[in-house]
């Protein structure tokens, strides 16, 4: 399995504080069957993004796990003016494995109309955008038409594995399953931060998805699509998303908080 969203590197954000903790997370991931991890620290007004430091820590962690886990870097990209300008000027600094896929995390306090222009500007810079964990964002759950429009404009969607098991609450769980059922999901990742509450594990969730949606879908979401993003290649699995249903339907109720 390939995990494209994981806060694995130490001392950069709200992930592990020490290299020892990072090694423990890496060992947990290896034991769970994860073969590749993209370390994606936050890039926002709280945490300064430093690609060179990320690469240095990634090499150090890789040496400590003896090459048993493929590591690369990316970031959890927030749509600030400064970030957007920096990404347009040097797109590969922020992307998965320095290729062309970028994880986008939306704020949970506002979804202004100007977001669409910001996304378009990043796409025009050659970036393939991945909307991270919309199932956990109450604003996106309340406005699924925005997410549908982003998918129609060429964005992809990544949900958090443990959202499917209820770890992030019933609203996120319902939304995650609804997104999957309607082919609005392209990646499932850990978004791990530690070894306790948010560990780097995917196997149990992979088995749930395989049982409910089939082994082909599970392989696409946990391996084929993430590996394509890692390599900067077109996604091999992009089923046609079901259209948005009327606001009065069960679909809207499933997305509501």
Image (cartoon, grey):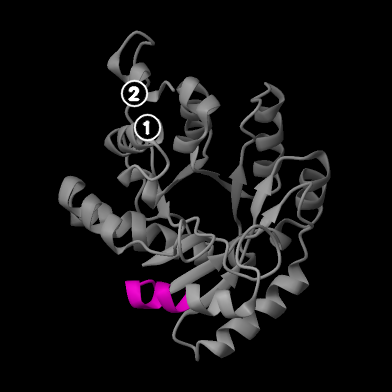
Percent of width and height locating residue 155: 52, 40
Q: Is residue 247 above or below residue 22?
A: above
Q: CA distance from mark 2 to mark 1?
A: 6 Å
Relative to residue 116, is residue 82 drawn left or right? right
The kind of secondary structure element at disc 1 is helix
Residue at left 58%, top 89%? Answer: 63
Query: Furthest residue to the front?
Result: 196
Percent of width and height locating residue 120: 66, 35
Callout count: 2
Q: Are marks 2 and 1 in contact (CB under 8 Å)?
A: yes
Residue at left 30%, top 37%? Answer: 177
The quarter in which the N terminus is drawn is: bottom left
Q: Is residue 35 above or below residue 215?
A: below
The kind of secondary structure element at disc 2 is helix
* Residue, disc 1: 175
**Prevailing secondary structure class for the magenta stretch in the rendered image:** helix
Instruction: Decide whether residue 27 is among the magenta residues.
Output: yes
The quarter in which the C terminus is drawn is: top left
* Residue, disc 2: 254
Determine crowd level at label 2: few under 14, some 14-19, many 20+ residues with C-alpha closer than 10 A. Answer: many
Which is more toward the observer, 233 or 76?
A: 76
Residue 14: quadrant of the picture? bottom right
Which is more toward the observer, 159 or 22?
A: 22
Determine crowd level at label 1: few under 14, some 14-19, many 20+ residues with C-alpha closer than 10 A. Answer: many
Q: What segment is highlighted magenta in the picture?
A: 26-34
Instruction: Decide whether residue 167 is among the magenta residues.
Output: no
Percent of width and height locating residue 180: 31, 39
Q: Earlier in the sequence, mark 2 or mark 1?
A: 1
Which is more toward the observer, 203 or 97?
A: 203
Residue at left 35%, top 61%? Answer: 202
């Amino acid at each position: 399995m390939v995990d494209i969203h994981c806060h694995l590197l130490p001392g950069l954000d709200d992930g592990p504080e020490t290299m020892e903790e990072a090694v423990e997370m890496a060992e947990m991931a290896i034991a769970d069957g994860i073969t590749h991890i993209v370390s994606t620290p936050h890039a926002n007004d709280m945490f300064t993004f430093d690609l060179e430091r990320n690469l240095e820590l990634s090499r150090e962690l890789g040496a400590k796990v003896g090459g048993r886990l493929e590591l690369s870097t990316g970031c959890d990209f927030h749509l600030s003016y400064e970030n957007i300008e920096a990404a347009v000027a040097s797109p590969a600094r922020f992307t998965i494995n320095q290729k062309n896929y970028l994880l986008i995390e939306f704020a949970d306090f506002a979804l202004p109309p100007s977001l669409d222009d910001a996304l378009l500007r990043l796409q025009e810079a050659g970036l393939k955008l991945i909307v991270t964990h919309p199932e956990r964002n109450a604003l996106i759950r309340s406005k699924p038409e925005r997410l549908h429009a982003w998918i129609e404009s060429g964005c992809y969607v990544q949900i958090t594995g443990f959202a499917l098991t209820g770890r992030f609450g019933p609203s996120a769980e319902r939304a995650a399953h609804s997104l999957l059922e309607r082919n609005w999901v392209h990646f499932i990742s850990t978004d791990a931060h530690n070894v306790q509450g948010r560990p780097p594990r995917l196997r149990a969730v992979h088995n749930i998805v395989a049982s409910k949606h089939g082994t082909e879908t599970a392989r696409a979401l946990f391996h084929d699509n993430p590996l394509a993003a890692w390599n900067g290649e077109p996604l091999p699995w992009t089923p046609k998303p079901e259209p948005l249903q009327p606001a009065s339907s069960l679909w809207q109720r499933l997305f509501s908080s």
